[in-house]
Amino acid sequence: MSQQKRFTQRLTSYYLWYTLLFFIFLIVLTILEKEGVPRVWIGYLFMFATIVIYAGIGLVSRTSDIAEYYVAGRRVPAVFNGMATAADWMSAASFLSLAGGLYLQGFEGLAYIIGWTGGFCLVAMLIAPYIRKFGQYTIADFLGTRFAGKPNTNMVRILAVLATVFISFIYVVAQIYGVGLITSRFTGVDFSVGIFLGLASILVCSFLGGMRAVTWTQVSQYIIIVIAFMIPVAWLSAKHTDNPFPQISYGAFLPELAKKEAQFDNSAKEKEVRNIYKLRADEYDKKIQQLPESWESGRAELQKNLDELKAGNGSLIAIKTASRALASYSASPADARNSWAEARNSYLQKSRSGFAQYTPYAAKDKAESDIKRNNFMALVLCLMMGTAALPHVLTRYYTTPSVTESRDSVFWSLFFIMLLYITIPSLAILVKYDIYNSLVGSEFSKLPSWVTYWANIDKLNPLVSITDINKDGIVQLAEIVLDGDIIVLATPEIAGLPYVVSGLVAAGGLAAALSTADGLLLTISNSLSHDIYYKIIDPTASTQKRVTISKLLLLVVALVAAYVASLKPADILSLVGAAFSVGASTLFPALILGIFWKRANRQGAIAGIITGFFICVFYMVFTHPLFGGSPDNQWWHIAPISAGVFGVPAGFVAMVAISLMTPAPDQHTVELIDYIRAP
C-alpha cells in the first residue's frame, strides 16, 4: 500500500471518530437542556467547544516548512480537499445569507445558487488542472510567471497581488461581520467585541500552521456545517409534513404560500398598511423636492427640540435620544438627498402589492419583467466567472498530490456544496410557511419571544422590526421586516425547536464564517509575502523568514479587516456579490487567455487587468447609493452587484487588442503554456 493511501485511510479514521464524538456531544447537551441547565450555558458550551477544536487542530498542525505552510505539502487527498474547499466556499454568505436572500427574493435568489455552483464547473474545466500542473503557491505567482515577458518584469505579478488583496479583503470583511453577528448573539457581548473574539479563533488556525492547519480545520468545520444545517431543516420538514427529507417535501408548500400571499395582497388591512407606506414615501419625496431648505429646516427643528429639552430639564434618556438624532442627521444637503431617496424607495417598495415570488421574473409589465430577467442572468454570469477567479478557492487546488486529483477534488467540492445548496431553498420555504401561519394575523401583545430578542441584538439597525403601522393591534405581513442575515440563525426559535438546535446552527454559521475567513486571510498574507516580499524585495530570504513575514502580514490584515467589519459597511450578501464582480472583471480574462491563448502577452494582461477593474469599480460607484451614485445611472438597468458583466468583456477586449498590437510572447512562455496544458 502506498504512503498516500495509508495517509488517506488514517485521515478517514480520524474524521469518523471526530463526527461520532460530535454527535455524542450533541446528545449530552440535549440531556443537559432537559435537565434544566440554563440556555446561556449551552450556548457558551457550543461556542467554546467548537473554537477549542479548531484551535487544537491549528496547534497540532503548526509548521514552518514552506511547502506545508503555503500548500499543505501537496498531499491532501481529493475527497478531503473537496470538503476543505466546500468549507472554504460555505462562507457566512452561503450559510447565513443565502436562505435569507431566497426568503426575501424568492425565485430571483436562485441566481446565487446557480451562479456559484456553475462557477465550479468553470473551475473544473478551465482552470484547476492547469494551475496544479504549474505547481507553485499563489494565483499571482502563475500570472506573474505566465506574463513575465522579456525583459523580465513583475508588473503583472504586482497587479495580480493588488487584485487578490482587494477581492479577498472585501470578502473577508463579510465573513468577520458574520462572526461578530453570531458571537454577539450567543455570548451577549457587544457586536464589535464579538468580532475581535471571533478573530482570535481565526488567527489560532491560520497563524500557526498556514495552509496545513487551515485545511484540516476546514474539513472539521465542514462536518459541523453540514450537520448544523441539515438537522433543523429536517426537523422542520418532519414537523410540517412527517417527511424528514426537506429537499423532497418542500415543493408541496409552494402552492399554499402563493395562495396565502394572494389572500394577504387582497386584504383590506394589508392595503391600509401599504397606503401608509405610500404617504411616507410621498413625504420624503416632498422633502427631496424642497432641498436645500428642507435640510436646513429639519436640522433647525432637531436643534430646537434638543435645546428645549435641556432648558426644560428633560429626562436624560430624552436628551440622549435627541442628541443622537441630531448627530446622525445628514451632514449636507447632498447626503440628505441620498439618504431620503433611499428611505423613499424603501417605502415605495413596501407600498406596492406583491407578486408571486415563485413565478420567474414576475412584474407588473413585460418591460419590468425583462429587466428582472436581465439582472438574473447578469448576476449568474458574474458569480460564475467570479467563482472561477477567486484566489482563495483556486489556491486550494495547489494542495492536491497530482493534476488528476485536482480534477477529482473539484468534483468532490461540487458534491459537498450540493448537499447544502439543494437544502437551502427548502429552509427558506419552510421558515416562510411557519411565519405566515404563526406570526401573520397574531396580536402585537402576544409576539413570540424571538422577535424581541433579535430586535434587541442591534438597536440602531434592528435585525427584526415588527411595527403596528395601522394601529390595529394585529400583525400584517407588510408590517414585518426581517433582515435576511438572521433567517438561518433564528430558524430554530421561529419553529419552536429546542435551544440546543439554536446552538448547533450558530456553531455551523460560525464554522462557515471562520473557515472562509481563514482561507482568505491566508491567501492575502501568502500573496504579499511570497509574490511581493520573496519574489521582488528579497529573493534570498530563508524559508523561516518567509513564513514569519507571512504570519506578521496575516496579523495586520486580520486586524484591519476586523476594524472595517465593525463599521458594518453593508449586508453580507452585497459585500460578497461585489467581491465576485471585481474578481471576475480583474482576474478571469487574464487566467483564461493566459491558459488558452498563446498570443496573450504581458502588455495585454496589464491592460486587461486594469481595464476590467476600473470599469467594474466605476460602474459600482456610479450606480450604488452607498458610494454616492444613483440607480438612475444604471446601464440597461443592470444592478451594481452585477458590474462584472461590463468589466469582464472590457477586460477581454483590452487584453486581446493590446496583445495583438504588441510583440508575441517569447519561446520560454510558449513552452510553459505547452507544459501546463499537456495531459
Image (cartoon, grey):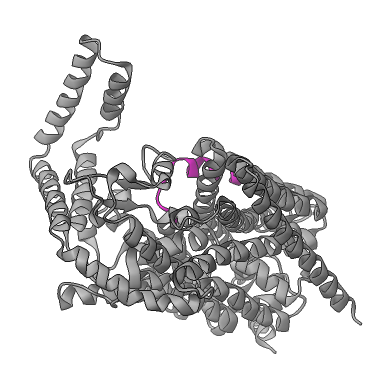
Q: Furthest residue to the right?
A: 1
Principal secondary structure, stretch drawn in magenta? helix
Q: Is residue 579 above or below residue 252?
A: above
Question: Foreground: 129 or 339?
Answer: 339
Q: Quadrant of residue 315?
A: top left
Magenta residues, start to end = 557-572
**Residue 404: x, y in percent?**
72, 84
State which quarter of the image contains the N terminus: bottom right
Q: Is residue 592 above or below residue 353?
A: below
**Residue 302: x, y in percent?**
19, 25
**Residue 176: x, y in percent?**
54, 49
Visible in this render: residue 422?
A: no
Taking the spot 49% from the left edge, 77% from the top edge, the residue there is 247
State which quarter of the image contains the C terminus: bottom right
Magenta run includes residue 568: yes
Question: Foreground: 58 or 54?
Answer: 54
**Residue 403: x, y in percent?**
71, 81
Taking the spot 40% from the left edge, 58% from the top edge, the residue there is 574
Q: Quadrant of residue 286?
A: top left
Q: Furthest residue to the bottom?
A: 679
Question: Foreground: 142 or 634?
Answer: 634
Residue 22 falls left or right of residue 438? right
Taking the spot 25% from the left edge, 67% from the top edge, the residue there is 261
Q: Furthest residue to the front?
A: 35
Visible in this render: residue 42?
A: yes
Taking the spot 25% from the left edge, 14% from the top edge, the residue there is 314
